[in-house]
Amino acid sequence: MQKLDLSGEKPIFLQIAESLEDAVLSGALPEGGQLPSITELSVQYTINPATALKGINLLVDQGAAYKKRGVGMFVAEGARALLQKKRRGEFSSRFVAAMAAEAKRLGIPRQELLDMVAREFDGIEKGR
């Protein structure tokens, strides 16, 4: 899991939830697999257990995780697709809109911007 920014503006519990989401999306936490315990998260990040629980509960509220009483928290079946849908919805407003607005301010024509995006995408696919 990724490092948390304890002094940043984003609340720690949101960072915990996003880190767990990232692990599900990458396959590091497979569907049906057990999530790290509240204790493990609180020790790993030196945070209050209630903060760790709040982060995990966000995944439970979304339907991406569930609790097995007395055993722990687990990644729900279908969690990856659920999280992809959620993140895709956020993607346009967070990244694409800002990129398009900046391109407009810089006078970059639509086709040139699309070409830039295609080059970057191709580079990622080729491992650059």
Image (tube, rainbow, N blue to C red):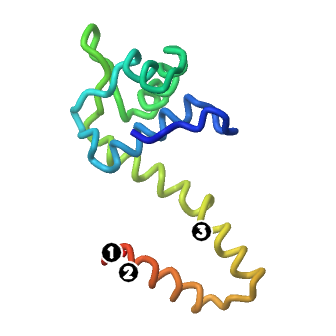
Q: Amino acid at mark 2?
A: Asp
Residue 5 in which image quadrant: top right
Q: Which label number is shown at residue 122?
A: 2
x and y percentages locating residue 24 in the rendered image: 33, 43
**Element carrying mark 1:** helix
Q: Amino acid at mark 3?
A: Val
| Residue that badge 1 annotates | 125
x and y percentages locating residue 114 in the rendered image: 54, 85
Residue 37 in which image quadrant: top left
Q: Residue at x 21, y 33 (%)?
A: 32
The reply to whether discs 2 and 1 touch (Cβ–Cβ < 8 Å) is yes
Q: Amino acid at mark 1?
A: Glu
Q: Which label number is shown at residue 96?
A: 3
Q: Residues within 10 Å of mark 1 (few under 14, many from 20)?
A: few
Mark closest to the chain's N terminus, 3 or 2: 3
Q: Which label number is shown at residue 107?
A: none
